Amino acid sequence: MAVIALFSVILASLGHDLAVRAATTERVVVSRHSGLAIEGFDPVAYFTEAQAAVGLRDFEASKAGAVWRFRNQGNRASFVAHPEIYGPRFGGYDPVDLVRGVTYPGNPRFWAIVDQRLYLFGREEHRDAFAANPAQYLKDATARWPALEQELAQ
């Protein structure tokens, strides 16, 4: 009986890991020097603290080929449970640049949350332009993203 229970726990954890992996399939901006996603900023803090906050080495998780850092264990747990909610849309690439047909990594200091999704921008001016008309930028960036993401994979 204990073997069956252990087997069930292992299968459940594998299923959870596969679900998390499937939810974070967007190609994510990762520092080639540190391996950190979004320069080590805590993606959950944008939602919970309404600010860009640097994560700590003590609270890390590996997802989508990157190391993510968090300010506390609660933020880490929230991200691991729901990376599709807390991870930046378009993998952290600037949606204004995506509309122009180029992939440029967003700066975690220039950000916006629209419709409960995090967006990062390469420049403050891009964030301001996006904020003036998010629906149009999102429509156009969403249309261009699949082809641009495919180019990143090559």
Image (tube, helix red, strand yellow):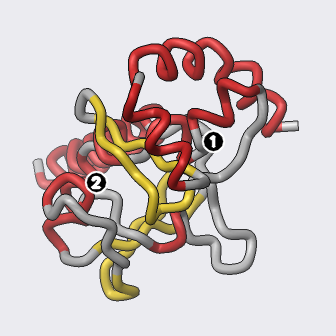
Binning the other alpha carbons within 10 Å of mark 1 as few (below 14), some (14 to 19) or many (20 upward) gives some
Amino acid beneath label 1: Arg
Percent across and percent down for residue 106 are 58, 53
Q: Which residue is mark 2?
A: 79
Percent across and percent down for residue 115 are 25, 27
Mark 2 falls on what kind of element? helix
Q: Which residue is mark 1?
A: 27
Residue at screen point 11% across, 48% down: 1
Mark 2 to mark 1: distance in Å?
17 Å
The quarter of the picture where the C terminus appears is top right
Residue 95 in the figure: left or right of residue 21: right
Name, please, the residue furthest toward the right: 154
In this picture, is 125 found above or below 39? above
Residue 14 in the figure: left or right of residue 74: right
In this picture, is 33 found above or below 44? below
Residue at screen point 39% across, 47% down: 87
Residue 87 in the figure: left or right of residue 140: left
The one of 109 and 69 positioned closer to us in this rendering? 109
The one of 56 and 101 positioned closer to us in this rendering? 101
Binning the other alpha carbons within 10 Å of mark 2 as few (below 14), some (14 to 19) or many (20 upward) gives many
Give residue 36's quadrant in the image. Answer: bottom right
Mark 1 falls on what kind of element? loop
Numbered tag placed on residue 113 in the rendering: none
Q: Earlier in the sequence, mark 2 or mark 1?
A: 1
The one of 98 and 8 positioned closer to us in this rendering? 98
In this picture, is 131 found above or below 6? above
Percent across and percent down for residue 88 are 43, 45
Amino acid beneath label 2: Phe
